Image (cartoon, grey):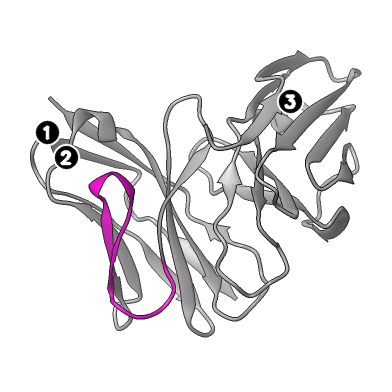
Amino acid sequence: ETGVTQTPRHLVMGMTNKKSLKCEQHLGHNAMYWYKQSAKKPLELMFVYNFKEQTENNSVPSRFSPECPNSSHLFLHLHTLQPEDSALYLCASSRDGTTPDPNEQFFGPGTRLTVL
Amino acid sequence: AQSVAQPEDQVNVAEGNPLTVKCTYSVSGNPYLFWYVQYPNRGLQFLLKYITGDNLVKGSYGFEAEFNKSQTSFHLKKPSALVSDSALYFCAVRVAGSARQLTFGSGTQLTVLP
């Protein structure tokens, strides 16, 4: 395993539900990321946190709300989602997300989300 | 600006044969290039990266990639494919010396036939 864990692994929710995805990294990294992976499309970067501060939000709808209480934990709060939000949501971490250095990212296994 | 293209959605190869998964990129400057692999029900795993120096980069599981600046390509290769290499492969790029985030390709599904 890569040292990045995600829970739950699978989630089915209705459009009116509120749920949260959790990510935890055990690598001592300072940057954490949320990605959306849809079939046959490039990974879509959603949010980036460096040292607990959000540094990037790629025009993500407000029905997705991230939270980073410390450098090891990252949440994605979900509410009033749409069926087109069904996808695999991946969390990743890296040593530092602001440096120009080419630090590779380490990914969790993802949460398979289905919105009914 | 930065972008990456993986022109093949699917690559099939017989076990024991050499394999190539193609990637071309576009950046305004020098690139950092990465390959990741995703097995079913798993996250992406880092395979290798090009920063500078030798154009041939060696990575995990016997994979290597060749950086070709004139053709703006970074193809992934392996001399002898294994059935266990069957997975989804992603190429990614970022501009060297920039704090911009990675841009990923759409992925290539590699199937190695026994």
Q: Nearer the viewer, residue A41 or B85?
A: B85
SS of the residue under disc 1: loop
Crowding at mark 3 (Cα within 10 Å: few <14, some 14-19, many 20+): some
Q: In the rendered image, is residue A116 in sight?
A: no
Q: Position of residue A37 (x, y in %)?
A: 60, 39
Identify which amino acid the numbered label 2 is placed on: Ala
In reply to whether residue B62 is colored magenta, the answer given is yes
Real-space Cα separation, disc 1 to disc 2, in angstroms: 5 Å
User: Residue B51 occupies which quadrant of the picture?
Assistant: bottom left
| Circle 1 or circle 3, nearest the eye | 1
Q: Is residue B49 above or below residue A87?
A: below
The subunit letter for the residue under badge 3 reads A
SS of the residue under disc 2: loop
Please determine if labels 1 and 3 lie on a single subunit: no
Q: Position of residue B45 (x, y in %)?
A: 47, 43
Please report the residue visible at 60 percent of the width from the left and 81 percent of the height from the top. B97
Q: Which residue is mark 1?
A: B15
The subunit letter for the residue under badge 1 reads B
In reply to whether residue A12 is colored magenta, the answer given is no
User: Residue B77 occupies which quadrant of the picture?
Assistant: bottom left
Identify which amino acid the numbered label 1 is placed on: Glu
Q: In the rendered image, is residue B31 in sight?
A: yes
Q: Position of residue A78 (x, y in %)?
A: 86, 30
Q: Which residue is mark 3?
A: A83
Left or right of A13? Residue B99 is: left
Q: Which residue is mark 2?
A: B81
Q: Magenta part of the protein: which range?
A: B50-66
Q: Mark 1 near mark 2, Cβ–Cβ under 8 Å?
A: yes
Disc nearer the start of the sequence (1/2): 1
